[in-house]
Amino acid sequence: MELAVYTKDGKKTEKTVTLNDDVFGIKPNEHAVYLDVRHQMANRRQGTHKTKERNEIKGSTRKLRRQKGTGAARIGDIKSPLLRGGGVAFGPRPRDYGFKLNKKVKTLARKSALSYKAKEDKIIVLEDFTMEEPKTKQYIEFLKGFELEGKKSLLVLTDNDRGIRLSSRNIPGAFVTRASQLNTYMILHTDSLLLMESSISEIEKICLKQTEPVK
């Protein structure tokens, strides 16, 4: 697939780049995408939920009434889960929701997500640029040049650029990441994918390296 290269002002240049079909042109695997997104969302969960159980409630352990002869159901102490203010039976405990996912599945999911964006013409290639100072206003003008103001966009850099990162930080829906940190959820969570020209080779290198057969 061949795409035109744009300047940061939104103007089309005479240059073009060719995207590797093994990364941007595969038949998407929906199940791999589902597993990878679920894996990433599960890892984000804190898992700190907790309710007090019977042994953690403060109160007397005295039996409230005798076992038999009252005509009512038998009952224990005041910390019983059946009573108001008692402990919670089978309540949530702190836990880790993460699970293992093979690297090949993650790579397939990432390539599937990139192929989705390429098929939908939601990938824009930019000439490499930097921002010497953090200027939110300049980044907004940059988004306006591509009619992305108010939409979700993801700018992929080769290396960390402090000026660009800080400029986009206060803009809702404007995300910035490095090629090495790009994942399936980030790709699918945005309306348009903005790729720095130099980041394309980095993305392809990462995706293809993990699918090479072991020698």
Image (cartoon, rainbow, N blue to C red):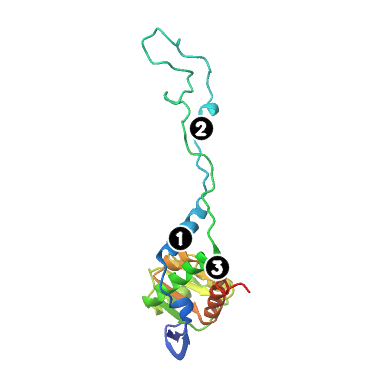
Quadrant (top left, top right, bottom left, bottom right) of the N terminus: bottom left
Quadrant (top left, top right, bottom left, bottom right) of the C terminus: bottom right
Q: Position of residue 49 (x, y in %)?
A: 50, 42
Please state which amino acid type lies under the numbered disc 3.
Answer: Gln
Q: Is residue 72 above or below residue 183?
A: above
Q: Position of residue 25 (x, y in %)?
A: 43, 78
Tell me the CA gap for discs 3 and 1. 14 Å
Tell me the CA gap for discs 3 and 2. 39 Å
Crowding at mark 2 (Cα within 10 Å: few <14, some 14-19, many 20+): some
Q: Position of residue 205 (x, y in %)?
A: 56, 77
Q: What is the secondary structure assignment of the residue under circle 2? A: loop
Tell me the CA gap for discs 2 and 1. 32 Å
Which of the marked residues, 2 or 1, is nearer the chain's N terminus? 1
User: Does residue 134 appear in the picture of this structure?
Assistant: no
Q: Is residue 138 above or below residue 38?
A: below
**Which label belongs to residue 37?**
1
Please state which amino acid type lies under the numbered disc 1.
Answer: Val
Q: Is residue 71 above or below residue 51?
A: above
Which of the marked residues, 3 or 1, is nearer the chain's N terminus? 1
Question: Residue at label 2?
Answer: 52
User: Does residue 71 appear in the picture of this structure?
Assistant: yes
Q: What is the secondary structure assignment of the residue under circle 1? A: helix
**Mark closer to the observer (3, 1):** 1
Q: Position of residue 54 (x, y in %)?
A: 51, 27
> Most extreme residue toward the front, as rendered?
215
Q: What is the secondary structure assignment of the residue under circle 3? A: helix
Crowding at mark 3 (Cα within 10 Å: few <14, some 14-19, many 20+): few
Crowding at mark 1 (Cα within 10 Å: few <14, some 14-19, many 20+): many
Question: Residue at label 3?
Answer: 181
Which of the marked residues, 3 or 2, is nearer the chain's N terminus? 2
Task: Kindly indicate whether the residue at mark 1 contacts the one at mark 3 (C-beta within 8 angstroms).
Answer: no
**Mark closer to the observer (2, 1):** 1
